Amino acid sequence: MPLDPDDVVDDWARRIEQQTALTTELSERLQGSKASAESPGGEATVTVDHSGGLADLRLSARAMQLSPDELAEIILATSRRAQAKLAQQVTDLVSGLYGAGSETAAFIGGTYAAQFPEPDDQDEADTRR
């Protein structure tokens, strides 16, 4: 049985509408994404926004007892941990919308994971000197 051209066009238009709705939802949810991490000793809590940029920084009284270099190391390491959490959240978000095995999820999740990798154990050890 031959395909009806109107059915083909209607199906194509429906798929375009679905894809547009998914893309809009992804964009809105990404814009609102944030992730936070607390340093192992509780000196700093860092929140990053959807781009991985600093959105909030909270320092405890203990942080004020550290040298500037020690505090800077703790803040940077904690920022990297928050960014890695963001990458995982984005991967989960995109996988939930597009499916874990989709090319879209692999591309976006992979891009965030490459930009914001899990900190290595050495980073954590350096902040605990």
Image (tube, rainbow, N blue to C red):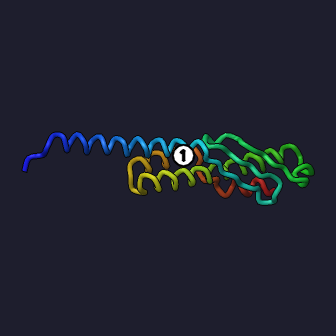
Q: Tell me which residue sits at (77%, 52%) in the image.
A: 45
Q: Which residue is mark 1?
A: 112
Q: Position of residue 66 (x, y in %)?
A: 89, 50
Secondary element at tag 1: helix
Q: Where 20 falls versus 106 (above or below)?
A: above
How many numbered marks does the figure carry? 1
* Residue found at the very far left of the displayed protein: 1
- The amino acid sitting under disc 1 is Tyr
Q: Tell me which residue sits at (74%, 57%) in the image.
A: 125
Q: Choose top left, top right, bottom left or bottom right for residue 19.
A: top left
Q: Tell me which residue sits at (44%, 50%) in the image.
A: 105
Left or right: 106, with 126 as reference point = left
Q: Where 92 falls versus 51 (above or below)?
A: below
Looking at this view, is 26 or 92 the one in front?
Answer: 26
Q: Position of residue 77 (x, y in %)?
A: 72, 50
Q: Position of residue 99 (x, y in %)?
A: 41, 56
**Quadrant of the drawing holding the C terminus:** bottom right
Looking at this view, is 16 or 48 the one in front?
Answer: 16
Q: Tell me which residue sits at (38%, 48%) in the image.
A: 103
Q: Position of residue 89 (x, y in %)?
A: 57, 53
Q: Residues within 10 Å of mark 1 (few under 14, many from 20)?
A: many
